[in-house]
């Protein structure tokens, strides 16, 4: 229950800050503002919550990291808007409602994604009372994870634009770039904002990369029946092997926290929750 309360608190802080940000946007193009709100409000908020949790557990004031957390969520939202476009995955629904391009049209959805990406860096640049050196380093981490060395490269691989996802190694590489890198950045940004030493920043990042990789496997295992055309780790191996890979990565994420004097309870709980999800899924499959 403590984990759920903290996650709900972080979601509330993120959503409140996000709405405040959008309220302050000048209404030069109301349709664009509407689309940004539509795309960015909602979701699990796990990436933004990770920023806040790491920052807070390392002694930081959570208010000082709010800008970084909504920046991360804006980057994630932009990626989903573009990911859903007809030239990408061509999805019709997202989070139980029509995708941005289905509601607003392809052109406005494309521009909405562009606006969210640039808004993310504006939000990050004005985050709380952080020293400029910490703020700059956090922004560099976010930019690296979101671009050609991270999420965008992962999307290129996912679309088969740079070789086919024909084996487990290529799918794993795509997962780590497309999903793992943002979780890695979330944890690193929180630690950097708190002024943590380099070994703690690296440990937090390792947790994020391991967790994000496993998160994507679990997510794809849950979605396999509905997305038959997508290449997933389970389709190039098997559900059993994919589940075992996710479990291995989640356990590695817990081991990555060893440099902390006390394991960050939020990160530990998050990894443990996904281990429980895998265990429950295996039990359900074995009982069929």
Image (cartoon, helix red, strand yellow):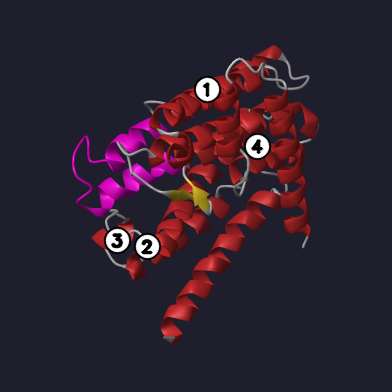
- Against 2, residue 40 (above or below) is above
Q: In this figure, which residue is indicated by the disc labeled 3?
A: 228
Q: Residue at x 29, y 61 (%)?
A: 228
Q: Residue at x 71, y 50 (%)?
A: 7
In this rendering, which labeled residue sits more in front, label 4 or label 1? Answer: 1
Q: Which residues are magenta?
A: 150-179
Magenta-colored segment: predominant secondary structure: helix
Between 17 and 232, the one nearer to me in the picture: 17
Residue at mark 1 to residue at mark 2: CA–CA distance: 30 Å
Q: Tell me whether the residue at label 3 lies in contact with that at label 2, contact meaning CB atoms closer than 8 angstroms.
A: yes
Q: In this figure, which residue is indicated by the disc labeled 4?
A: 51
Secondary-structure class at tag 3: loop
Q: Tell me whether the residue at label 1 lies in contact with that at label 3, contact meaning CB atoms closer than 8 angstroms.
A: no
Residue at mark 4 to residue at mark 1: CA–CA distance: 22 Å
Residue at mark 1 to residue at mark 3: CA–CA distance: 32 Å
Q: Please provide percent x and percent y for residue 137.
A: 59, 19
- Of labels 4 and 1, earlier in sequence is 4
Q: In this figure, which residue is indicated by the disc labeled 1?
A: 115
Q: Tell me whether the residue at label 4 lies in contact with that at label 1, contact meaning CB atoms closer than 8 angstroms.
A: no
Q: In this figure, which residue is indicated by the disc labeled 2?
A: 226
């Amino acid at each position: 229950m403590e984990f759920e309360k903290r996650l709900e608190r972080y979601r509330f802080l993120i959503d409140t800050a996000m709405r405040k940000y959008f309220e302050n946007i000048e209404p030069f193009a109301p349709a664009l503002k509407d689309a940004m709100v539509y795309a960015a409000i909602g979701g699990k908020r796990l990436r933004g919550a990770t920023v806040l949790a790491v920052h807070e557990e390392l002694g930081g004031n959570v208010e000082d990291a709010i800008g970084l957390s909504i920046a991360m969520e804006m980057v994630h939202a932009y990626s989903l808007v573009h990911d859903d476009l007809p030239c990408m995955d061509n999805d019709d629904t997202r989070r139980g409602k029509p995708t941005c391009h289905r509601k607003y049209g392809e052109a406005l959805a494309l521009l909405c994604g562009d606006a969210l990406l640039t808004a993310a860096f504006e939000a990050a640049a004005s985050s709380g009372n952080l020293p400029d050196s910490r703020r700059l380093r956090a922004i560099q981490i976010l930019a690296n994870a979101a671009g050609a060395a991270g999420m965008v490269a992962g999307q290129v691989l996912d679309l088969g634009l740079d070789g086919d996802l024909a084996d487990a190694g290529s799918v794993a590489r795509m997962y780590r770039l497309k999903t793992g890198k943002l979780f890695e950045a979330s944890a690193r940004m929180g630690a950097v904002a708190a002024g943590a030493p380099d070994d703690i920043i690296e440990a937090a990042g390792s947790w994020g990369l391991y967790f994000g990789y496993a998160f994507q496997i679990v997510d794809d295992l849950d979605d396999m029946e509905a997305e038959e055309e997508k290449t997933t780790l389970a389709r190039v191996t098997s559900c059993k092997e994919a589940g075992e890979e996710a479990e291995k990565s989640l356990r590695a994420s817990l081991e990555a926290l060893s440099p902390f004097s006390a394991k960050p309870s939020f990160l530990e709980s998050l990894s443990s929750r996904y281990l429980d999800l895998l265990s429950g899924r295996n039990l359900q499959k074995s009982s069929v």
